Image: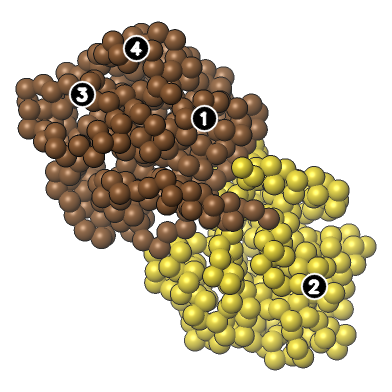
Chain colours: A brown, B yellow
Amino acid sequence: MSLLVVGSIAYDTVETPFGKVEDSLGGSALYFSAAASLFGPVNVVGVVGSDFDASKISFLKKRGVNLDGLYMESGKTFRWGGRYYEDMNKRETLFTYLNVFERFQPRIPETYQHSEYIFLANIDPELQLQVLDQIEKPKLVVLDTMNFWINGKRAKLETVLKRSDIIVVNDQEARELTGEFNLIKAIKRIVELGPKSVIVKKGEHGAMLYHAQKFFFAPAFPLEKVVDPTGAGDSFAGGFMGYIAQTDKIDFNTLKKAIIYGSTIASFNVEDFSFNRLKTLTMEEIEQRVKAFKELTTF
Amino acid sequence: MSLLVVGSIAYDTVETPFGKVEDSLGGSALYFSAAASLFGPVNVVGVVGSDFDASKISFLKKRGVNLDGLYMESGKTFRWGGRYYEDMNKRETLFTYLNVFERFQPRIPETYQHSEYIFLANIDPELQLQVLDQIEKPKLVVLDTMNFWINGKRAKLETVLKRSDIIVVNDQEARELTGEFNLIKAIKRIVELGPKSVIVKKGEHGAMLYHAQKFFFAPAFPLEKVVDPTGAGDSFAGGFMGYIAQTDKIDFNTLKKAIIYGSTIASFNVEDFSFNRLKTLTMEEIEQRVKAFKELTTF
């Protein structure tokens, strides 16, 4: 398996009804890697500032995360601040300091160029295209994006869509991407834009997969306490792609199981701030919760 | 099987992005009966005005709905007017004319008094108590309610809760009933108020069941066109209880299947206005969609 992620590495300041953390480790590339590395090695491409404390990610190295593509630039690391309220499906961004991320130009190290499974985390579609141009022959390209790019860089995003196999969006993004309010119609319209498969993340309402004209639904795992939803989407994507890369198949059954593994890991991630839960998470705990997922939906 | 429903019979005026109907047949007791009668006989208790056209419900009689408890009073039938927008999870009430429903005092006909399965549709908790006082020995009491009663008649509602086995609410109602925002916590708190089992209807996000300390999730059936959501909750309840009454069991497996049958019938109901779809719905169509539900969630 050779799995590649290009995304952000950040220091997050997060406030939720259960507490607050300042300058804690975050970013899509790291949440993805922490999840995917439970299944096998991951190649990371990203940028940090000279203030970045590398010792904080030693737990990822130990899990087989390759950091050859983690570049350090002079300046400060990307910082994001956000607040969540009772309804954790919504969040308020308090600040975004791009810092070194503003001049980020993804360079894929030579050792990564044969990567087969590619995750384009939520970054500028222009950078996503630069990544694809440097990869020889990917088996599967999974794309994440957001409203900011859907509205601001539509044309570039459409080019990325044509070169992607699976897109991961939330319901609002699916609607904005297609102009269709009905989610089922929106999903079918997205397929016309390029990706063969669509995943819609619905937070506490679970996730949907559309593949080969068939739907699959996974609920969110019932949690009595969601401490911090930051990284839920990226740890979901990491679990999803980690499972696929390990299995090395892309059929409907594999994708369905991958959705469940992704949901499972995301459900652990939100139980604590930053990487506190993912750091200690074991495959045994994951398998146990996957089993519980089965019981949740079997009739 | 002996299944009893007490609820409203109404003329609805409904506007959705797909059209408008005026003074069309509606009301919780009728939506419930139309769904439940696909499984077996249903006893209805309700009130209509002298303007009610009985020929409109002949399709229910043909399906084995017993209307001995349908009383005609001088005055006008209950009327409700509402509007739905693109986001069909929300609706705007345009008018509510209680008319004869304002003086409704449920009298249970002698032939109904041995009814074993009771559905208390969303009416004043005082009337729900009057119903329970007239039933000899129910096997299963299922309760529906709404914010209006949760806030306005809390004490009476708590008495009904103590005498109910299952409560059916939406997520907002579960939160208001308990003061807990987290839905999983809210559900567990509801059990402390009386009902052994809790069903949370989440509209397009599906339904959840909590029973014997276990959860079960059913997605909503993926529909490209939701024409009119009116009656979705009551046809869900009708399918749910119709299946249980026919099976005559109240274990977790039966409840899970009942949730799927309820969701299936509700998914048909919203495909057209008023009873247009339920009128012609067959058990064969239902079984086919139940099978599709299984494929939607199996991994």
Residue position for label 3? A70
Closer to the N terminus: mark 4 or mark 1? Answer: 4
Give me the C-alpha separation between circle 4 and circle 1.
21 Å
Q: Chain of mark 3?
A: A
Tell me whether the residue at label 3 lies in contact with that at label 2, contact meaning CB atoms closer than 8 angstroms: no
1 or 3: mark nearer the eye: 1
Above or below for B43 versus B82: below
Give me the C-alpha separation between circle 1 and circle 2.
44 Å
Q: Nearer the viewer, residue B140 or B77?
A: B140
Tell me whether the residue at label 1 lies in contact with that at label 3, contact meaning CB atoms closer than 8 angstroms: no
Q: Nearer the viewer, residue B70 or B229?
A: B229
Find residue A247 and name its label: 1
Give me the C-alpha separation between circle 2 and circle 4.
62 Å
Above or below for A262 versus A135: below
Q: Secondary structure at mark 2?
A: loop
Q: Chain of mark 4?
A: A
Residue position for label 2? B248
